[in-house]
Amino acid sequence: MAELQNIKKVLVANRGEIAVRIIRACRELGIQTVAVYSDVDRESLHVRYADEVYHIGPPQPGESYLRIDKLIDVAKKSGADAVHPGYGFLSERAAFAEATIDAGLTWIGPHPYAIRVMGNKEEARETVRKAGVPVVPGTHPGLTDEEIIKAIHQDIGFPVLIKAAAGGGGKGMRVVRKPDELLSSMAAAHREALGAFGDGTIYAEKLVDGARHIEFQILADMHGNTIHLLERECSIQRRHQKLVEEAPSPIMDEDLRARMGEMAVKAAQSVNYVNAGTIECLVDKDKNFYFLEMNTRIQVEHPVTELITGVDLVKEQIRIARGRRLSITQEQVRINGWAIECRINAEDPYNSFLPSIGTVSTYIAPSGAGVRVDSGIYEGFDVTPYYDSMLAKLICWGETRATAVLRMRRALEEYKIMGLKTNIPFHQNLMDSLRYQAGNFDTKFVEERFQMNEDESQLRPDVAAIMATLVEHQRRQQAAQIVQRPERDTSNWKWVGRYERMHR
Ligand code: MV4
């Protein structure tokens, strides 16, 4: 069906740690790489690691990393035969995917159609709903304001969440708790959406309170194979910025995983999805789950999935774009241990997470068993205010969740970044919090129930000892969770009490 595409040279249309990540995958596959850089990225790591580099303009993304014309130009000039967009920037712009394909190049990502449908949150919701995927009760697309109001009063009820169709990531959302606030909130949401996205379309959903954010990693090839690579727990966030992700989720059980995994595959198939993608869900206290949106790109937090499944997601993306089959089947997907990722940001956690800039005067990265650092910086690197404040990702693997937390504490302690403020103290406080250790948190945890300890000498020295006692218990618990479910019979009763040792 699909013709095999020759990929010998990839244009990496991004910067920072994800550009480095993509270059590394290409290097291991024997593929040449082309990096692009703005004025302030001349000495960035992705520029040092690439085979060829091209300057694309001033630091402002609108004049460099977001310029489709310049990027396609570089691709042609360099003789690249494929484009990898990374995350952020142009990664979810259907027009960039189209321009790439029109230039005769291979797009390492989903078809522009899938990007477009999933990019409109209202259309995405309707498309997956028709495929039998559970969505939060809400309005149908194409309603007038009057019809939306009527639907809220008659069918949805309060509290509702007004969302922007063109939004995503929480932009343009408004909670409405009382009927008398509805009109003004809708008007405000409409204005905000129009200003931010150039599209004022809004819709309404029932507010799901105190939920967790759990997402499923999807891979699909051009031969009709669509699989999921388990879930990631992403509830530790602040103002819609994720701070810590882990895989698997502490609340997952085998039955919920099977049902959500099946749902995620269905959602991807509803747009004939090909390549890597993520299905974002809300999971409430009763473990009801709802599709929220699909991210049609590789995500920041992809390494936690890589560490527990052993699948290199970026290599898999390239393999798929080449027209080859997925390297694994659903049945071959296994969980091995637990992985946690801390996003290391140039932000001051003691001062409302205010962005920090400056030259990295000392840089000592953690290493050792079970530690992975995906970084875009080095000693002497200048952190400028032009881009995202994420400098690096610290990802720790452990046989059990407790082992991973203990390893993360150790690695955070080893991590020395000087010359600017980072959120490392936040992560240290979080890893030492009993709520985090117990896996007992939702998306409101950081903003509403988490307190930074102002005195770093107060970091709990007893935590390691307490947590270490959890390790053996969790080992059994986790092993019990990953016993293969019997075909068809979805009840778990006959497996209760049986342990299957997965690791050693
Ligand atoms: C919701 C919700 C509650 N109820 N929808 C935030 C970003 C966008 N992906 C959708 N979001 C939410 N949609 C309903 N009907 C709560 C959120 C939400 C959230 C979701 C995921 C991760 C963090 C979040 C933080 C606040 C709100």
Image (cartoon, helix red, strand yellow):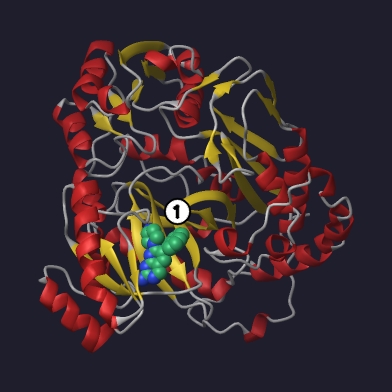
> Mark 1 CB in 8 Å range of ligand 1?
yes
Work out which quarter of the rendered image holds the C terminus and state it: bottom right
Which of the pair 370/451 is nearer the observer? 451
Residue depicted at 28% across the width and 44% down the height: 110
Residue at the far bottom: name it: 154
Which of the pair 171/94 is nearer the observer? 171
Which of the pair 50/38 is nearer the observer? 38
Image quadrant, ligand 1: bottom left
Q: Which residue is mark 1?
A: 240
481 up-or-down from 117: above or below: below
Instruction: Give the percent coordinates (x, y) of residue 25.
Output: 48, 29
Work out which quarter of the rendered image holds the N terminus and state it: top left
405 up-or-down from 254: above or below: above
Query: Label 1 crowding class (10 Å Cα cut-off): few <14, some 14-19, many 20+?
Result: few
User: Callout 1, which amino acid?
Assistant: His
Q: Is residue 26 visible?
A: yes
Specify the quadrant of the image occupied by residue 440: bottom right
Instruction: Give the percent coordinates (x, y) of residue 82.
Output: 29, 26
Specify the quadrant of the image occupied by residue 161: bottom left
Specify the quadrant of the image occupied by residue 207: bottom left
Q: Is residue 270 visible?
A: no
Which of the pair 196/499 is nearer the observer? 196
499 up-or-down from 22: above or below: below
Instruction: Give the percent coordinates (x, y) of residue 215.
Output: 46, 59
Q: In the displayed structure, does residue 195 sit left or right of residue 399?
A: left
Residue depicted at 76% across the width and 45% down the height: 409
Residue depicted at 11% across the width and 68% down the height: 142
